[in-house]
Image (spheres, rainbow, N blue to C red):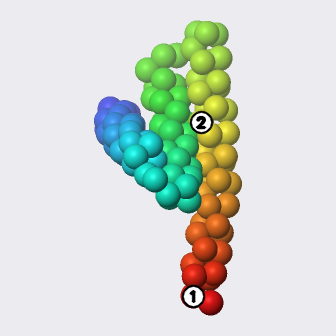
């Protein structure tokens, strides 16, 4: 059962890594500032999830060492901060996009 959980976490880690890279590339290639911000916010959310998944994977792989516990906690806190910052930024840019749409319809 633990092995299945490890594989599921690893697959989720790979998926978030690939999608994070995809949105990062879209963010850098976008010319519209609102779209660039939305893609960057999505990148932050996915990177936060990726760091938290990495922390959980490390919890399954390494056990008991003080250094590993510190690294796991650091990844978990950094991932949570990244995810919440991305959610906040996404909310801002969605609001900006709705304001632009409302101004264009007037």
For image coordinates 62% across by 82% down, the residue present is 102
Q: Residues within 10 Å of mark 1 (few under 14, many from 20)?
A: few
Q: What is the C-alpha distance between the residues marked 2 and 1?
A: 39 Å
Which label number is shown at residue 105?
1
For image coordinates 58% across by 23% down, the residue present is 72
Q: Position of residue 30 (x, y in %)?
A: 43, 52
Lower sequence index among marks 2 and 1: 2
Question: Looking at the picture, does residue 55 appear above or below residue 81?
Answer: above
Name the image quarter holding residue 69: top right
- The reply to whether callout 2 and callout 1 are in contact (CB within 8 Å) is no
For image coordinates 62% across by 40% down, the residue present is 82
Q: Residues within 10 Å of mark 2 (few under 14, many from 20)?
A: many
Between 96 and 106, which is closer to the camera in this rendering?
Answer: 106
- Image side of residue 32 versus residue 81, left or right: left
SS for dot 1: helix
**Residue bearing the label numbered 2:** 79
For image coordinates 57% across by 82% down, the residue present is 104
Question: Looking at the picture, does residue 9 appear above or below residue 40?
Answer: above
Between 28 and 84, which is closer to the camera in this rendering?
Answer: 28
Which label number is shown at residue 77?
none
- Image side of residue 63 versus residue 91, left or right: left
**Residue 38 appears in the rendering:** no
Q: Position of residue 34 (x, y in %)?
A: 56, 59
Q: Position of residue 3 (x, y in %)?
A: 32, 32
Between 34 and 69, which is closer to the camera in this rendering?
Answer: 34
Q: Position of residue 20 (x, y in %)?
A: 42, 42
The quarter of the picture where the C terminus appears is bottom right
The quarter of the picture where the N terminus appears is top left
SS for dot 2: helix
């Amino acid at each position: 059962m633990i092995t299945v959980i490890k594989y599921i976490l690893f697959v989720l880690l790979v998926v978030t890594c690939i999608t994070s890279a995809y949105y990062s590339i879209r963010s850098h290639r976008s010319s519209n500032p609102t779209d660039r911000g939305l893609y960057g916010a999505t990148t932050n959310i996915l990177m936060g999830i990726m760091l938290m998944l990495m922390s959980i994977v490390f919890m399954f792989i390494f056990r008991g060492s003080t250094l590993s516990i510190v690294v796991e906690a650091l990844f978990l806190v950094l991932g949570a901060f990244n995810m919440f910052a991305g959610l906040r930024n996404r909310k801002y840019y969605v609001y900006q996009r709705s304001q632009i749409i409302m101004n264009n319809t007037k």
